[in-house]
Amino acid sequence: MAIKRTKAEKKIAYDKKLCQLLDEYTKVLVAVADNVGSKQLQDIRRGLRGDSVVLMGKNTLIRRCIKVYAEKTGNTDFDELSKLLVGNVGLIFTKGDLKEVREEVAKYKVGAPARVGLVAPVDVVVPPGNTGLDPSQTSFFQVLNIPTKINKGTVEIITPVELIKKGDKVGSSESALLAKLGIRPFSYGLVITNVYDGGSVFSPEVLDLTEEDLIEKFATGVSMVASLSLALSYPTLAAAPHMFINGYKNVLAVAVETDYSYPHADKIKEYLKDPSKFAVAAPVAAAAGGGTAAAPKEEEKKDEPAEESDDDMGFSLFD
């Protein structure tokens, strides 16, 4: 016969287990466990076995264990984790890829009936079709203003009906009707709300970012830094190329307006003294690209037969 442990012994064992996990793992997923059953939780533990551990418990006990752990070891990185322990939550300690672990957890969702008093997480729509219920059950549909008709001795719903809106509480009539129709509209599982990684806490949406997203955001940030630096005339690495170009333009403008000159400015001054050179340079470039295209057009004109004159037809308009 197994010896039943006291509450104090259970707390000591729990504290020892949590401290061991804090020593071993640096990545933790915080998950809300509302409406998750014990069998479902066992399946999740089994699916994550190998590189992840699911820990459930009272928030006050977990906070106390983290506080004692920080005092003993001097490691205060997990203090941020204590602030996330609000509501019915559990901790998933992992050594694997955070995104893969989240995707694995999301697989274990179980359909659930619409119980009275539950807040609907999604819209519930009853589809049209034969319900299989006998005509004596029409009172349920009449109470909920669902259009029906009797077809071959059974009740048939004519049009789709939005029975419950997201955020509304499930009433007794809605719950009873969905149970009679065999509809389990809700699905529940562990929902990841926060991610802890080496002392940093961030939203799970960050795990969906790709390398392209990061490059795009980095480029946007560099552009903003460059714009701000140029506006304040404050040199930064991002603004340096633009500052050099603007400085070169200023030097070139001074050289054009004064007698001071250098090789690159000489060419600009030469064009400004004789603007016709611009006109000469442009047609030369255009002729190089368009000369080959002009020849076929001339050939086409040569190939066209000459139109017959009035004289060839035996008379003249001027006779």
Image: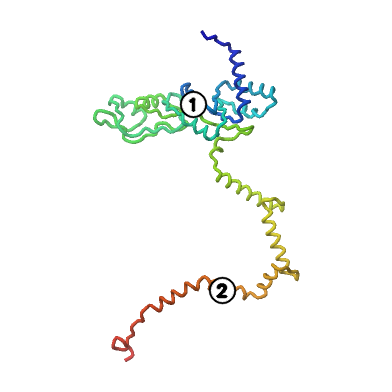
The colour style of the image is rainbow
Q: Nearer the viewer, residue 148 or 78?
A: 78
- Amino acid at circle 2: Val
**Neighbours of disc 1 within 10 Å: few (<14), some (14-19), many (20+):** many
- Amino acid at circle 1: Ile
Q: Nearer the viewer, residue 86 or 119?
A: 86
Where in the figure is residue 128, as x and y percent of width and height? 33, 34
Secondary structure at numbered mark 2: helix
Give the residue number, with chain letter if any, for mark 1.
44
Left-right relation of 295 to 197:
left
State which quadrant residue 303 falls in: bottom left
Compared with 206, 261 (above or below) is: below
> Which quarter of the rendered picture does the C terminus lie within?
bottom left
Where in the figure is residue 175, as x and y percent of width and height? 40, 25
Give the residue number, with chain letter if any, for mark 2.
284
Q: Residue at x 67, y 73 (%)?
A: 270
Q: Residue at x 61, y 30 (%)?
A: 26
**Neighbours of disc 2 within 10 Å: few (<14), some (14-19), many (20+):** few
Q: Label 1 to label 2, Cα distance in Å? A: 75 Å
Where in the figure is residue 45, as x and y percent of width and height? 50, 25
Compared with 310, 222 (above or below) is: above
State which quadrant residue 199 falls in: top right
Secondary structure at numbered mark 1: helix
Q: Residue at x 42, y 76 (%)?
A: 299
